[in-house]
Image (cartoon, rainbow, N blue to C red):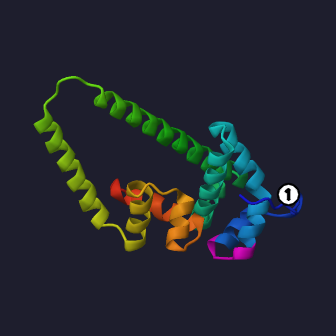
Amino acid sequence: MTDRVPVIEEQTVDPGGLLADIASGRKDSFAHFYDLTVARVYGTALKVLRDPGFAQDTTQEVFLQVWRDAHRYDPAQGSVWSWVAMLAHRRAVDRVRAESSASQRDRLHAARGHTGDFDHVSEDALDRIERDEVRDKMARLSGPQREAIELAYFGGCTYREVSEALGVALPTVKSRIREGLIRMRGQRV
């Protein structure tokens, strides 16, 4: 999200028409659409996430999805405003779930580290199987996705550090990591 102040009045612009233009690849229409809707998207994300940083990331993800999926908007299903709000809400809820899952994994990992006696052979075998599975899935990623994920997850770099190391824009890094993780889970991007 940028600090630009929207200069477009809602009454003078047809958001459905802008979406149609976005679907045909018009960047100027995307900029107008962004200015028209960014406050609502960010507000929706912030209401769910209660963290400005996560809300900004989610807002960016929503507009990336708008750029890619503008052709999917169906006016028969509801207004542009409800479509964009739904995208923002779903992304924010996904972020909450992901953060919750990560916290739960951290707690389980910490609890696993404090257990008493356990079967080291079984534990080592399971760890090896998981490592092999991760290696196999990583090998199926595109080079840029694999490189970004390796730096972020195995190198311990932040998104910004990955961006600097690879010499690509921060949104590109986030997209590569997100799409790579989706592919690793077996979903299509």
Tell which residue pokes out farthest to the top in this image. Answer: 116
Q: Amino acid at mark 1?
A: Glu
Task: Point out the stretch of residues depicted in magenta.
Answer: 23-28
The image quadrant where one finds the C terminus is: bottom left
Is 45 drawn above or below residue 11 in the view shown? Answer: above
Q: Which residue is mark 1?
A: 10
Q: Residue at left 71%, top 69%? A: 30
The picture places residue 108, in percent across and down from the top left corner, at: 35, 31
Q: Residue at left 27%, top 55%? A: 134
| SS at circle 1 | helix
Q: Residue at left 54%, top 74%? A: 167
Is 30 drawn above or below residue 149 in the view shown? Answer: below
Of residue 63 and residue 53, the one placed in the foreground of this image is: 53
Tell which residue pokes out farthest to the left in this image. Answer: 121
72 relative position to 41: left or right:
left
The image quadrant where one finds the N terminus is: bottom right
The picture places residue 41, in percent across and down from the top left corner, at: 70, 50
Visible residue check, residue 135: yes
Visible residue check, residue 74: no
The verdict on residue 175 being magenta is: no
